[in-house]
Image (cartoon, rainbow, N blue to C red):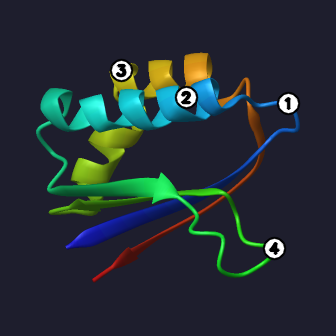
Protein backbone atom coordinates (compact mmCIF):
# COMPACT_ATOMS: atom_id res chain seq x y z
CA UNK A 1 0.00 0.00 0.00
CA UNK A 2 1.23 3.48 -0.87
CA UNK A 3 -0.01 6.36 1.29
CA UNK A 4 -0.18 10.08 0.47
CA UNK A 5 -0.73 12.58 3.29
CA UNK A 6 -1.24 16.29 2.69
CA UNK A 7 -1.89 19.06 5.21
CA UNK A 8 -3.21 22.54 4.48
CA UNK A 9 -3.42 25.79 6.36
CA UNK A 10 -5.93 28.18 4.85
CA UNK A 11 -5.20 31.77 3.95
CA UNK A 12 -6.63 34.53 6.08
CA UNK A 13 -9.99 35.42 4.65
CA UNK A 14 -10.80 31.93 3.34
CA UNK A 15 -14.51 31.46 3.93
CA UNK A 16 -16.25 28.47 5.48
CA UNK A 17 -18.00 27.99 2.15
CA UNK A 18 -14.69 27.82 0.27
CA UNK A 19 -13.28 25.32 2.78
CA UNK A 20 -16.41 23.15 2.52
CA UNK A 21 -16.17 23.25 -1.27
CA UNK A 22 -12.62 21.91 -1.12
CA UNK A 23 -13.82 18.90 0.87
CA UNK A 24 -16.81 18.34 -1.41
CA UNK A 25 -14.75 18.53 -4.59
CA UNK A 26 -11.98 16.28 -3.25
CA UNK A 27 -14.52 13.64 -2.17
CA UNK A 28 -15.84 13.51 -5.73
CA UNK A 29 -12.45 12.26 -6.91
CA UNK A 30 -13.11 8.81 -5.45
CA UNK A 31 -15.83 8.33 -8.08
CA UNK A 32 -13.60 9.59 -10.90
CA UNK A 33 -10.17 8.09 -10.18
CA UNK A 34 -10.38 4.30 -9.74
CA UNK A 35 -6.78 4.05 -8.50
CA UNK A 36 -7.83 5.54 -5.15
CA UNK A 37 -8.23 2.68 -2.64
CA UNK A 38 -9.09 4.74 0.45
CA UNK A 39 -9.62 8.47 0.86
CA UNK A 40 -10.06 10.23 4.18
CA UNK A 41 -10.15 13.96 4.67
CA UNK A 42 -11.36 16.57 7.08
CA UNK A 43 -10.83 19.70 9.09
CA UNK A 44 -8.49 19.63 12.07
CA UNK A 45 -10.28 18.90 15.34
CA UNK A 46 -8.70 21.93 17.00
CA UNK A 47 -7.34 19.98 19.96
CA UNK A 48 -3.71 21.14 19.59
CA UNK A 49 -2.76 24.71 18.75
CA UNK A 50 -0.54 25.26 15.75
CA UNK A 51 -1.83 22.34 13.69
CA UNK A 52 -2.59 22.58 10.01
CA UNK A 53 -6.29 23.15 9.38
CA UNK A 54 -7.17 20.38 6.92
CA UNK A 55 -5.81 16.93 6.11
CA UNK A 56 -6.11 14.40 3.30
CA UNK A 57 -4.94 10.79 3.58
CA UNK A 58 -5.12 8.78 0.37
CA UNK A 59 -4.14 5.15 -0.15
CA UNK A 60 -3.13 3.50 -3.42
CA UNK A 61 -1.92 0.06 -4.45
CA UNK A 62 1.35 1.49 -5.75
CA UNK A 63 3.39 4.64 -6.31
CA UNK A 64 2.36 4.46 -9.97
CA UNK A 65 -1.31 4.60 -8.96
CA UNK A 66 -0.54 7.63 -6.79
CA UNK A 67 1.04 9.31 -9.81
CA UNK A 68 -2.15 8.71 -11.80
CA UNK A 69 -4.08 10.50 -9.05
CA UNK A 70 -1.50 13.26 -8.67
CA UNK A 71 -1.54 14.08 -12.36
CA UNK A 72 -5.20 13.38 -13.10
CA UNK A 73 -6.86 16.38 -14.79
CA UNK A 74 -9.82 16.36 -12.39
CA UNK A 75 -7.51 16.40 -9.37
CA UNK A 76 -5.44 19.16 -10.91
CA UNK A 77 -8.63 21.13 -11.57
CA UNK A 78 -9.68 20.90 -7.90
CA UNK A 79 -6.24 22.14 -6.88
CA UNK A 80 -6.27 25.03 -9.33
CA UNK A 81 -9.86 26.13 -8.83
CA UNK A 82 -10.54 25.46 -5.15
CA UNK A 83 -7.33 24.88 -3.18
CA UNK A 84 -4.72 27.28 -4.56
CA UNK A 85 -6.93 30.35 -4.18
CA UNK A 86 -7.27 29.81 -0.40
CA UNK A 87 -4.16 27.91 0.72
CA UNK A 88 -1.52 29.63 2.86
CA UNK A 89 0.71 26.57 3.37
CA UNK A 90 0.90 22.94 2.37
CA UNK A 91 2.91 19.99 3.62
CA UNK A 92 2.89 16.51 2.13
CA UNK A 93 4.56 13.12 2.39
CA UNK A 94 4.22 9.81 0.62
CA UNK A 95 5.31 6.47 2.06
CA UNK A 96 4.82 2.75 1.84
CA UNK A 97 2.55 1.22 4.47
Ranked by sequence position, the earlier of labels 1 and 3 is 1
Above/below status of 33 relative to 93: above
- What residue is disc 2 on? 79
Is the residue under label 2 in contact with that under label 4 (CB below 8 Å)?
A: no
Q: CA distance from mark 2 to mark 1?
A: 18 Å
Residue located 27% across and 32% down the image: 29
| Numbered disc total | 4
The C terminus sits in image quarter: bottom left
Above/below status of 74 relative to 40: above
Query: Where does residue 96 sit, x and y in percent of width and height?
Result: 32, 79
Is the residue under label 4 in contact with that under label 3 (CB below 8 Å)?
A: no
Say the numbered circle drawn on residue 50.
4
Q: Quadrant of residue 28?
A: top left
Crowding near pointer 3: few (<14 within 10 Å), some, many (20+)?
A: some
Ranked by sequence position, the earlier of labels 4 and 1 is 1
Dot 2 falls on a residue whose secondary structure is: helix
Q: CA distance from mark 3 to mark 4?
A: 31 Å
Residue located 81% across and 73% down the image: 50
Ranked by sequence position, the earlier of labels 3 and 2 is 3
- What residue is disc 3 on? 74
Query: Where does residue 55 sit, x and y in percent of width and height?
Result: 52, 59
> Is residue 35 left or right of 79 when viewed as pictured?
left
Say the numbered circle drawn on residue 3.
none
Query: Where does residue 12 sit, x and y in percent of width and height?
Result: 88, 38
> Is residue 21 left or right of 87 when viewed as pictured?
left
* Image depth: mark 4 or mark 2 in front: 4
Say the numbered circle drawn on residue 13.
1
Crowding near pointer 4: few (<14 within 10 Å), some, many (20+)?
A: few
Above/below status of 31 relative to 92: above
Amino acid sequence: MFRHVVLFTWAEGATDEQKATVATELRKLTEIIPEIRAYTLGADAGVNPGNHEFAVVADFDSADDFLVYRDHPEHQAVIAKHIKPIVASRAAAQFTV
